[in-house]
Amino acid sequence: MPIEPIVIDAIINGKKHKAEKQAPRENPANPDETVGYAPLNTRAETIQAIDAADAAFTMWRETSFDERIARMRRAIQKIKEKTPEIAVLLAREHGKALYDAEGEIAVSMMWMEFACDNIADVLQNEVEEHNGGKTIIARDAVGVVTAISPWNYPISLSTIKIAPALLAGNTMVLKPSPLAPLAVSKVTELIANEFPPGVLNLVHGEAEVGVELTSNSKVAKIAFTGGTETAKHIMKAAADTIKHMTLELGGNDAAVVLDDFDVNDDKAMRRIVISNFLTAGQICMIAKRVYVHEKIFDKFIEKYREAADKWIRVGDPFDKNVTVGPLNNKKQVEFVQRLIDDSKQKGAEVIKLGKVLDEELYQRGYFMQPTLVLGADYDDPIVEQEQFGPTVPILPFKDDKHAIRLANNSIYGLTSSVWGKEEHALEVAKHIQAGTTMINTAAIQGLDVRFPFGGVKQSGIGREYGKEGLLSYAETHVINIPKTLDLPYIPE
């Protein structure tokens, strides 16, 4: 029986705002089905949302930590109560398997609770007395924050911004991706309802909305997760008013498998497979290129294929046996397929992994069976570019120095992983250029919200998660009360 499409509205100054135009969002597993509609807000409506956030800031910045935290905890509880239905909506509009959707919400709640537990301590004033004087280091709210979140993890990559921003005393306007706008809007509405009007606003739309959010003079900070090319445009738009920025961008994350890695460790091998194909490979911190020591290369490939064939089951996101659902959109399918076709034309071997559980559904939706690419050159597009889909090249290396050079040969540096005996892996990890390097695990499996996350090189600016993620939504304000000094070199 068909499910009635839902309709999402903007939220401006505490009220739902109906737009003149709406955009449909299809189900990636069945593109003929419309899951819901999101508004196409205008530049004028975006300005209204920014103005509402600006007006609310004066009041909100003066509220106590206790009040901010209490409101956020109420929102967390409301989201937890609604998690089953939100997860279903997320799986339908995104395409990720239901267990993956539930996991995304769980990670979001972990972070929001961490933020509530730590915000007051992290942002408390520091007082130092010296020579009869005193210095206070205060952590002031920044102002209006605009947040632009992506489609691959829409809820977690929105709440990662919402929680610290509001708890630090800022106000916000959030714009989700049009490719997964529904579930995150439901979550945002639940949060906004627990806060005064204007503190958290929600808009949707196309380029004109994004331009206003990144150039408006009332905006003090931009928090963006998405592609590096888009971030370049954002930086240019923000340049005239010198805004604060947190940019979590693309990554082409390397996994280095050392010669002392135990290829017979089934659990470790499964972790590598998951690090390649969770969410159909559509995660910024997924392991997108794997380098394996030539001494163990052939055995590794054999064991990798065994692990992949056991874990990968492609099909309906609501089938409990399914581990990999469809890709989010047709454009992404076409991009990944071009990389695979290019590899084939250049002589690489492309090996299908796992199994398709429902061939009829597979043909209907935006599905791709995960693939392993062998024999690619180190500078082929499938190695150098971020695939953001269910394919992975695996290549050999000669020694540790060679592996480090290969891993660092990228404009990106978001995450990386090293696999082998811990002491050896740690030594190699120290030389890899990345915001995070994991040992014997990778991607979401090694994520810990207690510690900062972000990239180097063209993978971003700033950090989210951890105490640094909380501090990034505050200004450092030094208040100095020096002892009166007679300074002989200053004339009266």
Image (spheres, rainbow, N blue to C red):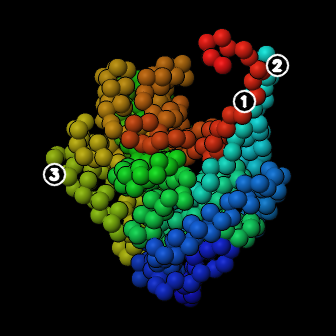
Q: Nearer the viewer, mark 3 or mark 2?
A: 2
Q: Please tell me whether residue 146 is drawn above or below residue 185 in the rendered image.
A: above
Residue 465 % position (x, y): 62, 44
Out of 158 and 335, give the one closest to the viewer.
Answer: 158
Q: CA distance from mark 3 to mark 2?
A: 75 Å
Q: Residue at the spot x=60%, y=57% of the render?
A: 144
- Residue beneath label 1, please? 480
* Residue 276 is at least partly visible in this image: no
Q: Residue at the spot x=70%, y=50% of the render?
A: 168
Out of 190 and 257, give the one closest to the viewer.
Answer: 190
Q: CA distance from mark 3 to mark 1?
A: 67 Å
Residues marked 2 and 1 touching at CB (< 8 Å): no
- Would you identify the image quadrant in which residue 14 lies? bottom right
Residues marked 3 and 1 touching at CB (< 8 Å): no
Q: Nearer the viewer, mark 3 or mark 1?
A: 1
Q: Quadrant of the C terminus?
A: top right
Q: Residue at the spot x=25%, y=46% of the render?
A: 381
10 Å crowding of disc 2: few (<14), some (14-19), many (20+):
few
Residue 64 % position (x, y): 81, 52
- Would you identify the image quadrant in which residue 289 lies? top left
Which label's residue is closer to the chain start, 3 or 1?
Answer: 3
Q: Which mark is residue 81?
A: none
- Residue beneath label 2, please? 132
